[in-house]
Amino acid sequence: MSATPFEAARAHTEQEHAVGLLHVVNTDGSCAEPADTNLSTFWQPGWEATRRDWCFTVLLDGRVHELHTERCLAAAHGNGKPPAASVPQAPPPSQTHFADIDGDDLDDPDELPTTASAPRLATPPVASNLPKVRWPLLTPDYLMHMPPVEWLVQSYVAEGAFSVLFGRWGSGKSFLALDWACCVATGREWLGRPVKQGPVLYLAPEGAGGGWGKRLNAWTTIYGPIDGDVLRFIRVPVNLYRREEHALLDELHRQGTFGGHDPVLIVIDTQARAMVGGEEDSAKDMGLFVAACDHLRQATGCHVLDLHHTPKAAGDARGSGALHGAADAMYYIEKSGRFVTLNSPSKTKDEDERGTPAVALALVPVPGTGSCVLDVADAVPLVPGAIELLKRVASTKIPCGTNLAKWAEEGGMAHTTAYRYQRELLRGPYVAQGAECWELTPLGQRACTTSTTPVP
């Protein structure tokens, strides 16, 4: 008989314990873990967990404890998504925990405790007497039974990963990163894809302060307010090349940001402002920047999203290939007019690129805010002139290889206008080259069907 999802999640925790990735400690930081300790102690109220990442110990204030709680409860619920947790408040250890879950509870999800039941510590203790494991030796069985990737934004932003969103200046990088950040902070779906809610830290030293305010005003006007306890911005540079992430983490803990919890997403906007003094073309300097990003991920369990530029007239990230090698995913974004295209990732380490489709987006002005929000391209109506060109294409057999803008010019359309409308039709895409002639895509057919503009 195969193990239940709950049993599988618990078994993985026991494997982590066996190879030295997880240790059980008392809430005062003392290690009560003799060699023959039964991991069932881990599930008792009043205990916390520490995870040992590479060459240093990270005590995550119950985060690992809570992470396993969420995974096990999600598995028991059978929906792959943990119940919502209350971030700011720390419940007393006496509340229901795994010790109070029996087999009958797994058949009735309504009887399960929520993730808020996991005990947390107001101040993480320092576990000084844990066994030193600098390089845990993992077994093949451990690696083969690791839990699947969990997503902050389904198919795009994975928990605990490092991704790079790159494009030319003005390509819409910040609009997309802010959209993801706001969705994660509020738990709102992104383009119909599920989102896991959690605190977000946005490093935004670029641009005037008024611009960020306008973008946030536009987003909240359309989607609703954002709680300041789950989304914070830093408007001064944090130099990761100079390894200032140590001071940043200390400051977050000192201020008790996010109610003492770690962010699940940190956005770096942009890399150029986060490695001042470093040479982007230097593998050594880029390696220092990547090491700082890794430290942020290991210390908090967060996803680090790095916004970066391309060289002039190029479609790859600027600088040393060390960045490309270190990233778990690389996303190229480009913009034409009001249309923004998020291309399929040029690289993913653990997932199939084909599972992450390209997305056609558009910048939609929000009246009264002076800014825009992103929406799917087919939700943005074409202007009448573009629909006119679209319907001309539909009613005429235009051979493949024909430049639509030049063809429209020959029909009397102004040069600049013809090229602007051609870009809009191709970005949709509303038109595409068929076997012999230009054809309307399904998106273009819907645009023609819903439009009342007559064919000239």
Image (cartoon, grey):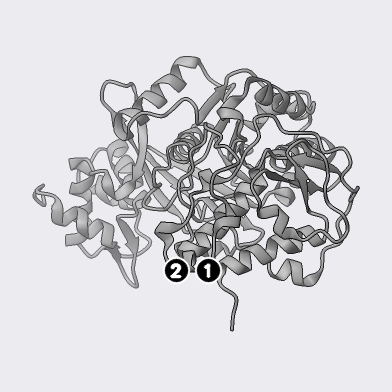
State the residue position of label 2: 107
Q: Which residue is mark 1?
A: 103
Q: Is residue 93 left or right of residue 152?
A: right
Identify the residue at horizontal 64%, vertical 38% (top origin).
311
Where 340 falls versus 366 (above or below)? Answer: below
Element marked by disc 2 = helix
Checking the image for residue 321, the label placed there is none
| 73 relative to 409 in the view: left or right | right
Q: Residue furthest bottom?
A: 1
Which residue occupies 71% across, 37% down?
296
Q: Nearer the viewer, residue 118 or 58?
A: 118
Residue type marked 1: Gly
Q: Where 28 falls versus 101 (above or below)?
A: above
Vertical position of residue 53 compared to residue 9: above or below: above
Disc 1 + disc 2, Cβ < 8 Å: yes
Q: To which quarter of the image does residue 125 belong?
A: top right
Q: Amino acid at mark 2?
A: Asp
Among the 4 quarters of the image, the one containing residue 36: bottom right
Locate residue 286, reporting x and y percent.
78, 38
Residue 447 seen in render:
yes
